[in-house]
């Protein structure tokens, strides 16, 4: 236990602060809302049988993810540095060892790996903007839409090209250091995305098998519960909330001292969950109405949504706008995936921002080809969990992020002295401090350890 925790962090941020609490909520929402909500949640829920998965997922989001998000913000604001230095500094302060910096370092590596596949999928959404505009989805059938998807994902050149374009944009934005400017973009993008999703929901309710889709998502079939499914739900909770790797910690470093960590985190988690659930409610009715397979995997949204757009008046434009907004949502997430590694390089190697961003970007770009190839040339090359993509996804979402989260919650709940966490949370939290503490000390660590032990077959 720490002897020397400072009452309220008296450090000031090295690079200024958010203009307001709302700006912070926008930036963290920009990181959280992305492909994880609209692309990944429906296909993982589909692969894991729907209702029971969604229930476990919601438990993970609110009982494990939310307290860990609060802890990350707390640590970021208290350390006011990049995640690696913050963890090292606070580790030193609270427990006399800077080895906690390793948590930040492994987070930066996780961000690296995630961005390598994230950029490929985001590239597909960019391709879909152009496909929509060129009329590729006019009069769509399940077969024609499947063929368009196949022609993009199935081609190394196409997929590699869009991956390069998307990652190039990310590198430029990170090099310019605009991560604090994204609040303006997010302010328009998020409500617009939400409105388009509502329009799509209206379509699904009228033209899709809405009741079947709804029941698929919310009627739990507990025979579908399995250790791998619970691990997948936990992994998805971490992925979608951007927690366990320091992205939220990095943003927390700019949070003004008087902003409420509890309320801001809660707002972000609610926005993120609402968009994921909305995406599921849009996709599954279309899946069932068109006899598609809910377990079909990463191509799911790319093979379902164009069917809906194609039958709407002006659908071509709605589709282009939707994929544009999704690409923007992915871009604000991608920036936050890259940021920890870039800032870290800048601080330990003294590189300028553009040099650090280009170097990190180059490595991520090369790694991205493992994912590009996983959907064509190397699709039959499988080991452990499947293709290269499947393995990188599993390693990061289901292992690295939850392990990072475990370290963070143990640090805040057990290592950090009560005085330190109270001073960051309590002034505004009241009884929610007690709830946070209970979740951080017991519920989150125990749930995470059980999920891991279960997944490696200890209880089998
Ligand atoms: N939360 C993002 C999404 O749902 O698309 C992905 C992500 C961003 C994961 C940033 C992790 C992260 F640090």
Image (spheres, helix red, strand yellow):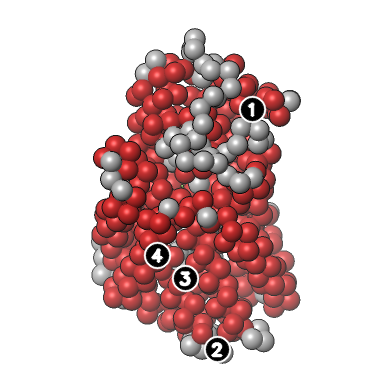
Query: Could you tell whether 160 is left or right of 82 in the image?
Result: left
According to the image, label 4 marks what residue?
A: 169
Ligand 1 within 8 Å, label 4 CB? no
Secondary element under disc 2, as helix, strand or loop, is loop
Residue with the mark numbered 1: 425
Q: How many marks?
A: 4
Q: CA distance from mark 1 to mark 3?
A: 39 Å
Residue 43, percent across and down? Answer: 51, 61
In this picture, residue 223 sits left or right of residue 374? right
Q: Secondary structure at mark 1?
A: helix
Which label's residue is closer to the chain start, 4 or 1?
A: 4
Is the Cβ of the residue at disc 4 closer than 8 Å to that at disc 3?
no
Which of the marked residues, 4 or 2, is nearer the chain's N terminus?
2
Residue under circle 2? Answer: 138
Residue 264 coordinates in the image, percent (x, y): 65, 41
Q: Judge from the rendering whether residue 213 lies leftward or rightward of residue 243; answer left or right.
A: right
Q: Nearer the viewer, mark 4 or mark 3?
A: 4
- Image coordinates for residue 454, horizontal then vertical, percent: 46, 35
- Looking at the image, tell me whether mark 3 or mark 2 is earlier in sequence order: 3
């Amino acid at each position: 236990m720490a002897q020397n925790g400072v009452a309220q962090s008296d450090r000031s941020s090295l690079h200024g602060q958010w203009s307001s609490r709302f700006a912070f909520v926008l930036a963290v929402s920009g990181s959280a809302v992305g492909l994880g909500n609209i692309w990944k949640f429906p296909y993982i829920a589909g692969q894991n049988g729907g209702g029971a998965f969604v229930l476990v997922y919601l438990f993970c989001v609110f009982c494990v993810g939310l307290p860990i998000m609060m802890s990350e913000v707390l640590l970021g604001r208290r350390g006011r540095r990049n995640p690696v230095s913050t963890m090292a500094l606070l580790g030193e302060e609270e427990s006399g060892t800077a080895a906690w910096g390793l948590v930040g370092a492994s987070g930066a590596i996780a961000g690296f790996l995630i961005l390598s596949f994230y950029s490929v999928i985001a590239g597909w959404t960019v391709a879909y903007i152009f496909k929509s505009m060129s009329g590729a989805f006019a009069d769509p059938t399940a077969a024609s839409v499947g063929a368009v998807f196949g022609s993009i994902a199935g081609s190394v050149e196409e997929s590699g090209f869009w991956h390069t374009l998307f990652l190039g944009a990310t590198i430029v934005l990170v090099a310019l250091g605009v991560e604090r400017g994204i609040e303006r973009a997010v302010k328009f993008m998020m409500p617009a995305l939400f409105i388009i999703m509502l329009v799509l929901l209206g379509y699904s309710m009228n033209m899709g098998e809405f009741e079947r889709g709804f029941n698929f998502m919310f009627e739990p079939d507990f025979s579908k519960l399995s250790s791998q499914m619970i691990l997948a739900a936990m992994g998805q909770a971490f992925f979608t909330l951007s927690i366990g790797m320091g992205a939220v910690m990095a943003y927390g470093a700019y949070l003004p001292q008087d902003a409420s960590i509890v309320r801001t985190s809660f707002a972000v988690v609610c926005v993120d969950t609402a968009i994921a659930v909305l995406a599921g409610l849009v996709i599954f009715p279309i899946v069932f109405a068109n006899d598609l397979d809910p377990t079909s995997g990463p191509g799911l949204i790319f093979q379902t949504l164009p069917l809906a757009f194609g039958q709407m008046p002006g659908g071509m434009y709605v589709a282009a706008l939707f994929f544009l907004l999704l690409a923007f949502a992915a871009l604000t997430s991608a920036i936050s995936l890259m940021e920890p590694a870039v800032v870290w390089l800048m601080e330990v190697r003294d590189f300028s921002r553009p040099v650090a961003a280009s170097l990190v970007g180059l490595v991520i770009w090369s790694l991205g080809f493992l994912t590009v190839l996983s959907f064509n040339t190397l699709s039959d090359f499988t080991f452990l969990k499947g293709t290269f993509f499947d393995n990188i996804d599993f390693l990061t979402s289901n292992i690295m992020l939850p392990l990072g989260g475990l370290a963070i919650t143990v640090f805040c709940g057990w290592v950090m002295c009560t005085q330190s966490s109270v001073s960051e949370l309590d002034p505004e939290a009241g009884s929610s401090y007690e709830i946070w503490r209970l979740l951080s000390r017991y519920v989150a660590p125990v749930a995470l350890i059980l999920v891991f032990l279960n997944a490696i077959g200890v209880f089998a």
